[in-house]
Amino acid sequence: MAALQPSYVLQSTNTNGDAMFLTFREQVEKLLTEALEKCEYPSGDLALVVKPGYADLTSIVTFKLASILKLPPHEIARNVVQHLGSDVLVARAEAAGPYVNFFVSADYLHRALSVILEEDQNYGRVNGDHIVILEHTSANPNGPLHIGHVRNSVIGDTLMRCLKQAGCRVETQYYVNNMGRQIALVVWGLMNFELNGEIKPDHATAEVYIKANAEVELHPTKLNEIRELMQRFESGDQDVARLFEDAVEFCLQGINQTLKSLHVSHDRFVWESEFLDDLDGIIAELRDYGATENDGSMHIDLSSFGIGKNLVVRRSDGTSVYATRDIAYHVWKAGRCNRMIDVLGADHKLNALQVGKALELLNIGAPEVVFFEFVSLPEGSMSTRRGHFVSADEVLEKVTEKAYEEVDKRRPTLSVEEKSSIAQAVGIGATRYDLLRVSADKPMVFNWSEALDFERQGGPFLQYAHARASNILVKTIFDNNYDPNLLTDESEIKVIKLCAKFPAVIEDITKNLSVSVLTSYARELAEAFNQFYRFMPVLSAEPEVRRARLALVVSARIVLRNVLNCLGIEPVDSM
RNA sequence: GGGCCCGUGGCUUAGUCAGGAUAUAGCACCGGCCUUCUAAGCCGGUGGUCGAGGGUUCAAAUCCCCCCGGGUCCGCCA
């Protein structure tokens, strides 16, 4: 089985000269601009759109020009096409009514193949000039990750993989909230209840946390003990600090284990308490930019940004608030990268906006934030405190179990180890894909029957296409000697065209930070490969044709593998 | 009450930021395809007033206004 490749090369990259579709687009832009100039039409926005089914690239610039030139669009289109020059990547251009359609050449397809074979796992490099700090997950260490946290993790981890595929240097960080009320409750719970040593640390922590919450609700006077713990921590009491640290570290062990099984990793865990020493400086600086004092507390008026509420950056008792520590964290990050990206739940929108504005006041740009809406249960929203949640561990366990049944059904002769290994890969792939395919700003409802349903075009569908490609290649040797002119079937061209678009997809994601386009692209690519596979025999074809089709299979497998790696889904060779 | 987000076939969903030619897939349903590289697959079919109403535009799922339905935020919490 192919190992997932978490270690990407971190050096900076060449430019996008090898990204075929992007180069094609550039050439079309050039030809079109020249043609417009020859016609003495204004050339600004070329209005290029992608409309599969009609052409590889279409310009609708004629509509924009029509009102300026007082000419019908189709006449403009005809005239433009007549003045169009030529390029090796462009087979032809034609006016279809008002539309100016461009088609890729055979050369384009041939070059696309050789670029893929050449670049292999680096295929997809587009712009490597960014040094990125990407913060994601950052769940409070008061219990196990639930399926909502995992949406954050999977979006963040996939973004990291895409940015690295693009050639960026990326450091992922988990911001550990280790000094809040919730952690104080955990610490208090550990002092008052027995810890279950039989279960995973994060689950054991949740038990204690839930009990502590119930107890405090029953006897509100105990809140004083919680408050005292927090005050002693912030005033530098080493014994209390040790208790907090141990509790957090303990829970984090379990969380980390879950993340690892999801193929999610963090380069660095940054503890909130590390910024306590920076706060006086930050607050002083904010004062210079207009923060005002009131009864010893410190506020920033953000009404000029349309935020009605004042942001409190220091309490009247002198202690710090979360927002200020978050500002300090971002100031620190900003000094270490040229792109800050945070993945946050949509409930943090106002906070993030406030922190962003404060950072702008400090002349540090606001981070780019990817928000995602909640994952809820059919019976309502999840809550660690009330113990109402579906843990990631539970989901993974059941999904993997179900995957094993499926593997066992289809491949009864495999060994238990092989079946388990495939089941693991398929289960995790299905889970990650499901959380990624829905655009981040849509709320999701977690549903067991859907989570366990593999009869859909999800992660396993992609893995299956990859396994099919692998299965052909394992039976032969490809010597990189082939004639691309023999690849003329519609299904073959479709696969190559899609493969050629991969760098453009990666570029889009690094720009817009929206990962759901990758799931759509992956599905289309797998589908195209399956169609090719169904209609075009490879191993049994005539020697010349066989070599050409092998080149296609190798290329498609490279792109499928790179896509799967970006999605954090294991590209299996057999399933 | 105010801010932000969502509303696309029976169910789930792409596309909305950067308006253009037949609105994307899956599930479910109906009908085909395994002596040929793994059928977790392929081919075909049924099913849509893109929440409602106005507006802008040659052109609106996409932009603007208003309304309805759902989510979420509005702590000297984190």
Image (cartoon, coloured by chain):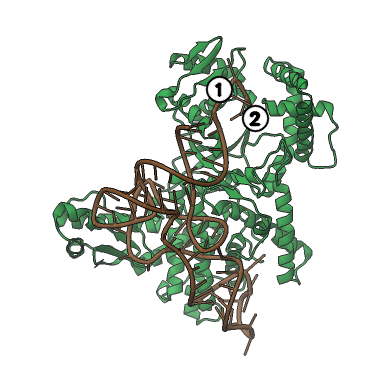
Chain colours: A green, B brown
Nearer-the-camera pick, A76 or A122: A76
Label 1: few (<14), some (14–19) or many (≥20) C-alpha neighbours in 10 Å:
many
Residue A210: quarter of image: top right
Q: In the rendered view, does A295 fall on the left or right side of A251?
A: left
Q: Which residue is mark 2?
A: A177
- x and y percentages locating residue A134 in the rendered image: 54, 38
In contact (CB < 8 Å): disc 2 and disc 1: no
- x and y percentages locating residue A127 in the rendered image: 43, 46
The residue positioned 55% from the left and 15% from the top of the image is A280
Quadrant in which the C terminus of chain A is drawn: bottom right
- Numbered disc 2: secondary structure: loop
Lower position in the chain sequence, tag 2 or tag 1:
2
Q: Is residue A100 above or below residue A271?
A: below
Q: Which residue is mark 1?
A: A324
- x and y percentages locating residue A93 in the rendered image: 26, 66
Q: Is residue A29 above or below residue A497?
A: above
Residue A363: quarter of image: top left
Task: Name the amino acid, label 1.
Answer: Thr
